[in-house]
Amino acid sequence: MDNMAKKDIDSFQEKTLADFVIQRRTEPDIFSWVDSFSETINYLSSIGHNMYRRVMLSANSNHVLVEDPLTKKEIEMIMMGSNSYLGLNNHPRVIKAAKEAIDRYGSGAGSPPHFSGYYDIHRKLETNLAWLKGSEDAMIFASGYSTNVGILSCFLGPKDTIIIDKLAHASIIDGALLSGAKLSTFRHNDMNSLERVLSQSQKNTAGDRLVVVEGVYSMDGDIAPLQDIYNLTKKYNAKLMVDEAHATGVLGKTGKGSPNTSTLKEKLI
Ligand SMILES: Cc1ncc(COP(=O)(O)O)c(C=O)c1O
């Protein structure tokens, strides 16, 4: 690292994870690809700028205790990367309920809920979530990633087309790829672009067409124009899926998230 030219240092600082993903596509040898990744991470760590896998020493809250990677000392930092917008992970009632659940059920279900690890508290949570969302029912998954991958790969197949916003989360893309459906994208929150893609896909899709957007986008925090998106999906006879990871608890008077289709329908009439 000591003899590193300034040009190399600048190029390290400008790199993002996406650069390595792209590089892998043209880099046939996994080990040399991994080496250049390690070099960058080591360099960023050596100047204290590596933001990945920082070791936290306290609950994830608006202030957190973190191990300083250079001095190994405990420092306090402001947390800007959490999705616990309401701080429920630290709420005394949630902590009490989690402790009681561990006392009663142990520390794990021993099986996925879809199989034989489905408890009364899972069902209660699903019922409450369905009530919150004003939906017929709900099904919980272990993570947002597994939700998108599970739903898309289960419901869609090679005859279908999945149309996603360009800024949609990677789990939506992975789910779409796993489904084997044709994948099309439209420009972020751009209704002209969505209409073009919907119109084209109507001609060349034998199966169903599903538009997938996010209620609130994770990176920029901007909101999807759901009423317009819903109108277009109706016009072109497509279906709509909304990832509410960052909208639930955040949008709406009571934190229900984006308006659901029944609310949108009512507004349309
Ligand atoms: C919009 C969106 N969907 C899905 C996910 C994946 O969620 P998880 O981290 O729970 O797997 C994320 C993660 O940040 C997200 O931002």
Image: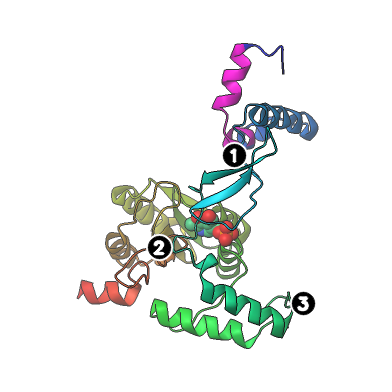
The range drawn in magenta is 6-20
- The x and y percentages for residue 173 are 55, 53
Location of the N terminus by quadrant is: top right
Residue pointed to by mark 3: 110
What SS does tag 2 mark? loop
Residue pointed to by mark 2: 247
In depth, the one of 154 and 92 nearer the eye is: 92
Of labels 2 and 3, earlier in sequence is 3
- The x and y percentages for residue 3 are 71, 11
**In which quadrant of the rendered view does residue 259 lie?**
bottom left
Residue pointed to by mark 1: 51
Q: Residue furthest bottom?
A: 120
**In which quadrant of the rendered view does residue 148 lie?**
bottom right
What SS does tag 3 mark? loop
Residue type, mark 2 in image: Ala
Asked whether the viewer can see residue 181, the reply is no
The secondary structure making up most of the magenta span is: helix
Of labels 1 and 3, earlier in sequence is 1
Q: Residue at x 61, y 24 (%)?
A: 12
Q: Is residue 8 magenta?
A: yes
Location of the C terminus by quadrant is: bottom left
Q: Is residue 63 above or below residue 42?
A: below
Q: Nearer the viewer, mark 1 or mark 3?
A: 1
